[in-house]
Structure formats: structure tokens, C-alpha cells
Amino acid sequence: MKLLSYIFYYPIIWVISRVSFRVLYILSDLLFFVVYYVVRYRRETIYNNLKMVFPDKSEEEIQEISKTSVINSTDTFMESFKSLNISEDEMKSRFKFKNIEVINEIENNNQSAIVLCGHFNGFEWMFIIDRFIKYNFYAVYKRLRNKYFDRLIKRIRSRYNGRLIHTKETRKTIAENAKSGTLDLYAFASDQTPRLQKSHHWNYFMNIWVPIHTGAEMIAKEHNFALVFMKIEKLKRGYYEVTFEKITTTPRDYKDYELTDKYMKLVEKEIYTKPDLYLWSHRRWKHKNKTPQPN
């Protein structure tokens, strides 16, 4: 059944990857209409998340953010297919790095690094960073259930020599690379909720008490990796600009979870600036208040 599903959908994906961007966004608008008004995909989750995080916003503002966030999500979804055939030059013109020198400086000091980013639109195209660095580039991802589509995702994202690491393989792969002495750059999107039984750290995120992923900080401390925050700004449809902010090059100088909290504050700031670009469809706050809060 998984193979049949792949055989059915792959030609559609291939055709989408070949259309112009003008047609791509017409298709994205049609997809938005189906997702938002017909299927109503996670509309309740999106609405509840927004009401929880922005209690002072009006009903009209909540509805507008909800709608725009889904539009941005369908754009990102369609752009991921476009990645199959987009040229390198066009990718560079549409996904620009404002201050790549932040990464280059760390690289020139022979230190591997972890780039942390939130689930904001546009992150699908970040693999073009390979053309601006000497690092071996890896991105941590959650493996798809359909192994055929999983292979396709790996093929698309490896066009620019980037490699995907499944979440369960992350520590082992990084440890092996560190032992061999290679210079590597790892991308983590660590703003979603961890499993409750594996939660080691809780804090306020968007004024709500929740568990927080700490893996990136722990790995950075273990191997003395630099930590960098990546902010993605959507300039207009199909055009993005990335800004890097160095968090630290000396992670072992910080108390446990201090760097994680600093990263989450940067994500918060990004959300408050452009809430419609965040992925609100995930149940980020599903474990809220399940452990005693500090006095």
C-alpha cells in the first residue's frame, strides 16, 4: 500500500516541481481553500493555540493570524516540492543569508556548530547554505512512516550535499563525527514539545509552563559546539532572508538549561514579531501545567 501511494503521488509531485512559481502559488491558494475551509485541518488546534498565547487579541485578529498561518504553511508545503527541480541560482536568489559571516567565523576557528531555529515558514530551503560554507551540513528530522516518501525527502534535501539525521540517530552520528574530527554544522528545530516521559526541563514559553527540548544544548556542551540562532524572515511569497545570531561559542561556561532558555526567548521574540509565520497546527502546549510551577 505504501508503494502504491508513492507511485500514485510521485508524478503529481514531479509535475508541481516543474511549474512556474506563479502557477505554484495558484495551486497553493487552491490547497489552502481545501485545507482551511473544506477539510478544516487542525483549525481548532490552531485557534486554541492562538487564543492561549494571545489572550488580549481580538477575535478578528485571531482569525486573521489563523488564516494567514495556514496560507504560509501551504506555501511552504508546495515550495518543498519545487525543491525537486529548482535551479541553484534561483534558490540562491530566493533564500538569502544576510550575515553568513557569523557561521564562517565559527568555521574558520575550527569549531563545529549547531544552528537552532523555530518552525517558521521557509526552513525547507535552508539546505542551500551548503554553497556558502565548508562545513559538512546535517539536519535533524523525524522519519516519515512511508519509507518511499522518506527516501524522496532525503533525495530532495541532499541536492546541495546536506544530510538528514533521524532523531533517534542524532547522538550516535554526532558522536562519531566528533570523534573523527570533522567540522560539521547541525540544524535543529527544537521549539516543539518533547515527550512527557523524557522531559528534563520546564519553563515558560509564551507565558505558558511547558516542557522544553534540551538535546541541542546537551550535545553542544558534550562536544564543545558553538550555538547559533537562525531567524527566517519571509519578505514576500517565495522570498526569504536569514539572519544568524551567535548564542555562544563556549557552551560549557553556562549552567544547565540556561542556553536552552535563551534560545526559546529568541523564538518567542520571532513569534511576537510575525505570529502568522509560526506553525500553529502542532500541539506545542499539550503538556502545559502538568508539573508544579515555581513560586
Image (cartoon, helix red, strand yellow):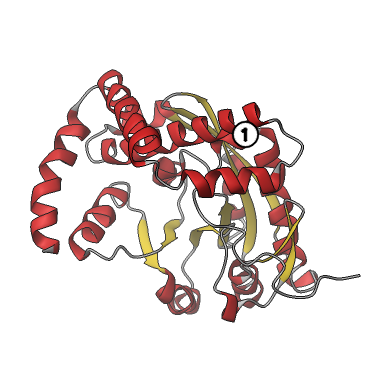
Camera-side residue of 63 and 163: 63
Task: Please tell me which residue is depicted at 63% across the width and 76% down the height of the picture.
Answer: 199
Relative height, residue 182 to residue 13 (above, below): below
Residue 254 screen position, x and y as percent? 79, 69
Task: Tell me where residue 152 sits by quadrant.
Answer: bottom left
Residue 292 screen position, x and y as percent? 79, 75
Give amino acid for label 1. Answer: Ile
**Image label count:** 1
Residue 22 screen position, x and y as percent? 29, 18
Task: Tell me where residue 203 sits by quadrant.
Answer: bottom right
Crowd rating for badge 1 (residues with CA inside 10 Å; few <14, some 14–19, many 20+) = many
For disc 1, the marked residue is 62
Q: Secondary structure at mark 1?
A: helix
Task: Please tell me which residue is depicted at 66% across the width and 43% down the height of the picture.
Answer: 51
From this viewpoint, which residue is outermost toward the right? 295
Task: Please tell me which residue is depicted at 50% across the width and 31% down the height of the picture.
Answer: 67
